Image (cartoon, helix red, strand yellow):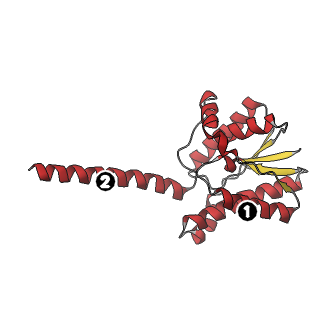
Amino acid sequence: MNLLMHMCCGPCSCYPLKKLRSDGIEPTGYFFNPNIHPYKEWEERLQNARKFANLMQMEFIADETYAMREFLKKALPAEGTKKGRCRMCYTWRLKESARYAAEHGFDSFTSTLFYSIYQQHDLMRSVAEHFAKEYGISFYYEDFRIGWQEGIDLSKDLELYRQAYCGCVFSEEERYSRVLRKLQRKENKEKKRLRLMA
């Protein structure tokens, strides 16, 4: 099978590549992630995806266009619900993967997004299947989540950069907001405790 594997990053590619190779499939990695911001984060993930491909001797293709403005133009109208924003992001990346695979002679495509326990798995699968039909190419479905911990261990062994958020500026904000809310609750509890002691 001539399979194009969309890569969201190096660490998320560890288990999917191992599983595919164990099934006799040698994929070509494809980095297309206009959702990742800021620029230094995008560049770090691109370089780590390339590093992973080199270490694993896997063919690698990258769209090296940093598309912050285009991403924001698409994301802001979809904002309002996390599902709407994420649907837009999945749609863009999976559509581009299906299109690229179809136009470059691949038999099928998949994505390392299906490794993440944090992504909306069923939504991504329906989006990928839709574009497989639109572009006349096969979507190779595999639930890679079963290898979640194994993938983490492999990425640490390879000393890959491990990110703390999905990539978009909205998820980064939400990540820090949760941390700030937790700290604020802790401070409020401490203030209450001190008042009770007074």
Judge left or right: residue 42 versus residue 195.
right
Judge left or right: residue 20 versus residue 164.
right
Q: Which residue is mark 1?
A: 126
Q: Which residue is mark 2?
A: 184
State the image coordinates of residue 32 (x, y, percent, origin top left).
72, 51
Q: What is the three-letter code of the residue carrying label 2?
A: Gln
Q: What is the three-letter code of the residue carrying label 1?
A: Ser
**Residue 9 appears in the rendering:** no
State the image coordinates of residue 146 (x, y, percent, origin top left).
66, 42
In the image shown, does 14 or 22 lie closer to the viewer? 22
Disc 1 on helix, strand or loop? helix
Q: In the image as oriented, which residue stretches furthest toward the top?
A: 157
Q: Residue at x 68, y 59 (%)?
A: 122
Q: What is the quadrant of residue 103 in the picture?
A: bottom right
In the image shown, does 41 or 4 lie closer to the viewer? 4
Q: In the image as oriented, which residue stretches furthest toward the left?
A: 198
User: Which is more foreground, mark 2 or mark 1?
Assistant: 1
Q: Residue at x 67, y 52 (%)?
A: 33
Judge left or right: residue 176 versus residue 111.
left
State the image coordinates of residue 64 (x, y, percent, origin top left).
71, 48
Please rate how many residues cluster around mark 2, counting C-alpha atoms within 10 Å: few if below 14, some from 14 to 19, many from 20.
few
Cα gap from disc 2 to disc 1, whole angstroms: 39 Å
State the image coordinates of residue 75 (x, y, percent, origin top left).
60, 65
Judge left or right: residue 135 versus residue 35.
right
Q: Does 19 sit above or below residue 87?
A: above
On-image quarter of the N terminus: top right
Please rate how many residues cluster around mark 1, counting C-alpha atoms within 10 Å: few if below 14, some from 14 to 19, many from 20.
few
**Residue 19 appears in the rendering:** yes
Do labels 2 and 1 touch, CB within 8 Å? no
Disc 2 on helix, strand or loop? helix
